[in-house]
Image: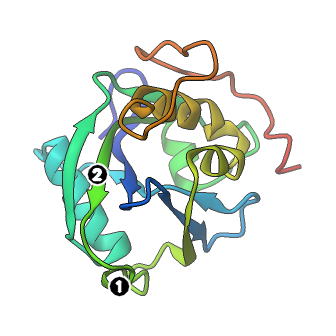
Amino acid sequence: MHGPTGYRSGVGIVLMNRQGLIFAGHRKDGRMPPWQMPQGGMQPGEAPEQAVLRELSEELGTDRVSIIGSCPHWLCYDYPKSTATRRALQFRGQRHKWFLLRFIGRDQDISIATEHAEFSAWRWMSPDEVVANVITFKRDIYRAVMQHFAPILGRSAQQAPISPFLIAPSRQQDDLHR
């Protein structure tokens, strides 16, 4: 979807296991750092809750989840100027509705070897590890999402809160992708 803001609409998924750790996938596209949480675009007419379950099935091959909650506002990020992907040429960035899901299956129920695999490996990380290991231009969004879900994740928000309404970092060069 291409709205008047130039942001592609999608969903982000914070998948938490029974130990309170978060799923992180190792991206196949070679970006450094390579880890991120599942996310994806919405199809025309699709509700965010439907998109979350579809993306989870497409990227992780599982539906063994329960939705715990979502951020009340859409969060945006801009692509770095240096990004020359097809999406970066079409859109200024992405806006996501973020959801927290509890994984109710076993690790064996996750299969990243899907038809259009996006990850080459995966592991469970602490919320701080996830934030530290995501590509720089997404880091503020990840911090905001983890802060929003901190009470459910059994953590206290340790930093000053980031405005949950709309986060649109400047289109600066990603310092780790030079």
Viewer-closest of 96 and 172: 96
Picture layout, residue 138 above or below residue 140: below
Q: Nearer the viewer, residue 76 or 33?
A: 33
* Residue at the (61%, 39%) spot, across then down: 138
Asked whether, in this view, residue 22 is left or right of residue 152, the answer is: right
The residue identified by callout 2 is 101
Q: Nearer the viewer, mark 2 or mark 1?
A: 2
Q: Is residue 67 left or right of residue 129?
A: left
Label 1: few (<14), some or many (≥20) within 10 Å? few
Relative vertical location of residue 118 with respect to residue 79 in this rendering, above or below: below
Farthest right residue in view: 178
Which x, y percent locates residue 46? 13, 47
For the residue labelled by badge 1, is the local secondary structure a helix, a strand or a loop?
loop
**Quadrant in which the N terminus is drawn:** top left
Which of the two discs, 2 and 1, labels the residue nearer the N terminus?
2
- Please tell me which residue is depicted at 89% across the width and 49% down the height of the picture: 178
The percent position of residue 7, horizontal first and vertical second, equals 43, 32
137 left or right, relative to 153:
right
Q: Which residue is mark 1?
A: 115
Q: Local crowd at mark 2 within 10 Å, few (<14), some, or many (≥20)?
A: many
Residue at the spot x=13%, y=43% of the render?
Answer: 47
Identify which amino acid the numbered label 1 is placed on.
Answer: Glu
**139 or 169, nearer to the observer:** 139
Question: Residue at horizontal 49%, vertical 43%?
Answer: 90
Quarter of the view holding residue 125: bottom right
| Residue type indicated by callout 2 | Leu
Secondary structure under tag 2 reads: strand
